[in-house]
Amino acid sequence: MAAAPSLTLFITLSLLFISLQRSESLPENPSMILLGDGFDWPISHGDAFDIDGGESFEDVADRRSLYWKRRRYYISYGALSANRVPCPPRSGRSYYTHNCFRARGPVHPYSRGCSSITRCRR
C-alpha cells in the first residue's frame, strides 16, 4: 500500500513535466508564426502593436511589408568615401567612374577583338 501513493505522485509529476514541455514548444496559434531572416526566433503579428493599441492595422501592415521584402543593394567603397557623389544609376556609367559627371566619350568603351565566335562582329 505504501507504493501506491509514491506511484501516484510519480505519475502526476511525470504528466506535469510532459505537459509543461509541450506548452512551451507549441505556439497558441501556429498560423500566426513567421520566422525572421537569419533568426530562429518566431515573430508573431501581435508584436507589431503597441500596448496602447495606438497604431492602426494598416499602418503596421505597411511598415512590416517594407521590412519583409528581401532586397540587396550594394554600395561601393568609393561611393562611401567623403566628398564624392556616386554616378546616377541610369546614366550607364559605372559606380567606379572617376568624376562621372565630367566624363565625356562613350559610356561603354569596351570593344572585343575578332575571334572565331564573334566573327569580328560588333
Image (spheres, rainbow, N blue to C red):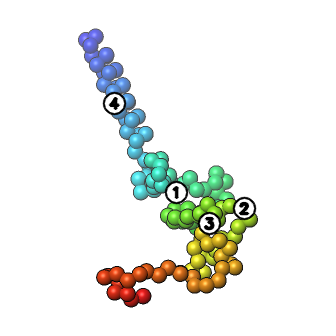
> Which residue is label 1 attached to?
45
Question: Observer-nearest residue: 52 or 62?
Answer: 62
Q: CA distance from mark 4 to mark 2?
A: 65 Å
Relative placement, left or right, of 112 versus 75 is left
Q: Are circles 3 and 2 on residues that touch, CB within 8 Å?
A: no
First-in-chain label (1 vs 2): 1
- Looking at the image, is mark 4 or mark 2 nearer the viewer? 2
* Separation of marks 1 and 4 at Cα, in angstroms: 32 Å
Give the residue number, with chain letter if any, for mark 4. Answer: 15
- Give the Cα distance between marks 3 and 1: 13 Å
Left or right: 64 as drawn, with respect to 9: right
Q: Residue at x 68, y 61 (%)?
A: 81
Amino acid beneath label 1: His
Q: Residue furthest bottom?
A: 121
| Residue found 37% across the figure and 39% down from its top | 22
Q: Position of residue 122 (x, y in %)?
A: 42, 88
Q: Where is residue 70 shown, x and y percent of the image?
A: 50, 64
Three-letter residue code for mark 4 = Leu
Question: Sequence order check: which comes first, mark 1 or mark 4?
Answer: 4
> Which kind of residue does numbered mark 3 sit on?
Asp
